[in-house]
Image: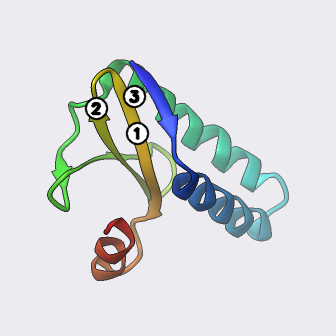
């Protein structure tokens, strides 16, 4: 399985990095390491996660309250968004449309 992180998800990761980096020096880097590890797990587990918002699989991060939303086409997992689960569900739905 190939993984492609789309530009929208990269922007989400950068935003999360800066949020956690402001909390404590080095926490932003730990956030990125953790989320990239979760994303890498899609090489093995892509497709086993529940479907949300009609078409996106949702992988919950192991360490942070973030969800990775992805779709599978052919042999590729396309990561569309990496969103904070503490946000309003209506905001998440709008972000994924």
- Residue that carries the numbered disc 2 in the rendered image: 73
Residue at x 47% of width, y 29% of height: 3
Q: Are marks 1 and 2 in contact (CB under 8 Å)?
A: yes
Residue found at x 21% / y 31%? 48
On screen, residue 72 above or below 19: above
Residue for point 29% across, 72% down? 93
Label 3–label 2 contact, CB within 8 A: no
Q: Is residue 95 left or right of residue 31?
A: left
Q: Residues within 10 Å of mark 3 (few under 14, many from 20)?
A: many
Nearer-N-terminus badge (1/2): 2
The answer for how far apart the CA atoms under marks 1 and 2 are is: 8 Å
Nearest to the observer: residue 33 or residue 73: 73
> In the image, is 28 to the left or to the right of 79?
right
Give the left or right position of residue 37, taking residue 43 as reference: right
The tag earlier along the polypeptide, 3 or 2, is: 3
Which residue position holds label 1? Answer: 78
Residue at image position (74%, 54%) is 27
SS label for mark 2 = strand
Quadrant housing residue 54: bottom left
The answer to whether residue 69 is above or below residue 93 is above
Q: Residue 42 has which mark?
A: 3
| Of the image marks 3 and 1, the number of the one nearer the N terminus | 3
Identify which residue, 30 or 40, lies in the foreground. Answer: 40
**In this figure, what is the number of numbered marks?**
3
Q: Are marks 3 and 1 in contact (CB under 8 Å)?
A: no
Q: Is residue 56 above or below residue 89?
A: above
Residue 75 image position (x, y, % from top left): 32, 20
Residue mark closest to the camera, 3 vs 1: 1
- Name the spot of residue 52 as percent of width and height, x first: 19, 56
* Element carrying mark 1: strand
Cα distance, mark 3 to mark 1? 10 Å
Disc marking residue 1 = none
């Amino acid at each position: 399985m190939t993984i492609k992180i789309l530009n929208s998800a990269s922007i989400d990761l950068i935003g999360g990095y800066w949020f956690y980096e402001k909390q404590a020096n080095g926490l932003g880097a730990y956030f990125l390491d953790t989320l990239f590890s979760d994303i890498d797990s899609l090489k093995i587990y892509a497709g086993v996660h529940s479907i949300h918002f009609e078409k996106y699989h949702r992988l919950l991060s192991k360490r942070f309250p973030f969800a990775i939303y992805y779709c599978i086409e052919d042999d590729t997992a396309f990561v569309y968004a990496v969103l904070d689960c503490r946000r309003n569900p209506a905001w998440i739905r709008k972000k994924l449309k």
